[in-house]
């Protein structure tokens, strides 16, 4: 019986592996087709000043709808894109779309707040990433202050010397850097004082339980104080309730992003919001 059980377990495992592999392969095939047929779009989630309530930024988030798979969550396809070596191409598509969109809004007389763009490790380490980015900005006539790059702890920690070089070139051009998903990656903190970083994003996992778990509340308080001591602005992501918001305000967190304020918006819906909040044009 033990032997049969073992074989069943093995078969189950093998079938599971096959299903996963097939799923991964269909995602990869779908991504290649999406690149070819321009099936990506970008949505924008506002980032609000917690004191004044003004929209001070927005995060650009990639969306992909496949003709057969339907809408695939970014949390599923981004890791596949990274493993398949497609993230540099896809990241470039995001940069082009976002910069063209900012240029269009500005041409329409709208005043978009600073737009944060997620950048993957592989993308940041491309040999001419900074030059390429500056070229795109120039071509679209978008000033470097109009954007911010979100990099995760993992991206920043790997090869600290190279990271420091790249970041100093980016910030020298006037482009801001934000650490995304802070608190979920590495335990070493010494890199924080060695890199030119303007903003720290407290990961959603802390915010989610901040009203219920004293431990997470303490950690979040410590993260906010540390960021402030290092001269960074703090943004809390994933704010869903008024209780979470109040706790973060009490701790002097400056900016918030989450469903409590806004879901990510289509570019058209975001433009409508901009038109409502932009200073009157005449
Ligand atoms: P992220 O950069 O940490 O983005 C925040 C995620 O939290 C987004 O998920 C956003 O829709 C979601 N979110 C915002 N507010 C709330 C809230 O109140 N509650 C909850 N439960 N979620 C909230 P999304 O758009 O599915 O993206 C997931 C991840 O995929 C991103 O996490 C980022 O790591 C990656 N990603 C998205 N777009 C890009 C991109 O253009 N390039 C790269 N490299 N990665 C991207
Ligand atoms: Mg992000
Ligand atoms: Mg994040
Ligand atoms: Mg994330």
Image (tube, helix red, strand yellow):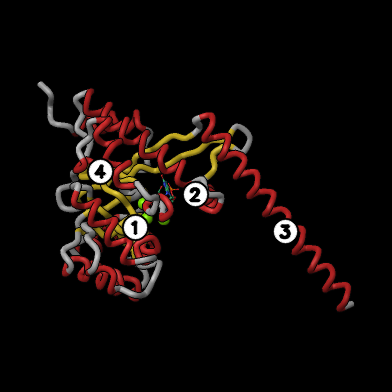
Q: Which residue is mark 2?
A: 78
Q: Which residue is mark 4?
A: 147
Q: Is residue 39 above or below residue 76?
A: above
Give the image location of residue 116, x and y in percent. 30, 46
Q: CA distance from mark 2 to mark 1?
A: 15 Å
How crowded pointer 1 is (Cα within 10 Å; few <14, some 14-19, many 20+) is rated as many
In this view of the protein, which residue sits in the foreground, 220 or 24?
24
Q: Which residue is mark 3?
A: 16
Please give the name of the residue rendered at 67% of the width and 54% of the height, measured from the top-left corner. Answer: 20
Give the image location of residue 152, x and y in percent. 37, 59
| Disc with the residue nearer the chain's start (2 vs 1) | 2
SS state under label 1 = strand
Q: Which residue is mark 1?
A: 180
The reply, left or right, for residue 81 in relation to residue 199 is right
Q: Are marks 2 and 3 in contact (CB under 8 Å)?
A: no
Q: CA distance from mark 4 to mark 2?
A: 21 Å
In this view of the protein, which residue sits in the foreground, 266 or 160?
160
Quarter holding the N terminus? Answer: bottom right
Q: Are marks 2 and 1 in contact (CB under 8 Å)?
A: no
| CB at disc 2 and ligand 1 closer than 8 Å | yes
């Amino acid at each position: 019986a033990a032997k049969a059980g073992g074989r069943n377990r093995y078969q189950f495992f093998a079938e599971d592996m096959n299903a996963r592999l097939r799923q991964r392969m269909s995602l990869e095939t779908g991504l290649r087709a999406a690149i070819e047929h321009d099936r990506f779009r970008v949505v924008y989630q506002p980032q609000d000043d917690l004191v004044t309530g003004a929209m001070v930024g927005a995060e650009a988030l990639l969306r992909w709808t496949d003709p057969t798979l339907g809408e695939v969550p970014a949390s599923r396809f981004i890791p596949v894109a990274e493993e398949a070596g497609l993230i540099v191409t896809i990241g470039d598509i995001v940069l082009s779309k976002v910069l063209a969109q900012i240029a269009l809004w500005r041409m329409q007389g709208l005043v978009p707040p600073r737009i944060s763009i997620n950048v993957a490790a592989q993308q940041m380490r491309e040999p001419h990433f900074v030059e390429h980015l500056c070229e795109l900005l120039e071509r679209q006539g978008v000033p470097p202050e109009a954007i911010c790059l979100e990099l995760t702890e993992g991206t920043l920690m790997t090869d600290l010397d190279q990271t420091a070089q790249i970041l100093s070139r980016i910030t020298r051009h006037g482009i801001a850097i934000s650490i995304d998903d802070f608190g979920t990656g590495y335990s070493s903190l010494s890199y924080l004082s060695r890199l030119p970083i303007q903003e720290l994003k407290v990961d959603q996992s802390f915010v989610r339980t901040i009203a219920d778990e004293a431990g997470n509340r303490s950690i979040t308080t410590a993260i906010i104080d540390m960021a402030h001591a290092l001269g960074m602005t703090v943004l809390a992501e994933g704010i869903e309730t008024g209780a979470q918001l109040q706790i973060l305000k009490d701790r002097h967190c400056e900016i918030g992003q989450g469903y409590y304020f806004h879901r990510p918006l289509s570019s058209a819906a975001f433009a409508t919001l901009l038109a409502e909040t932009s200073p009157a044009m005449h």
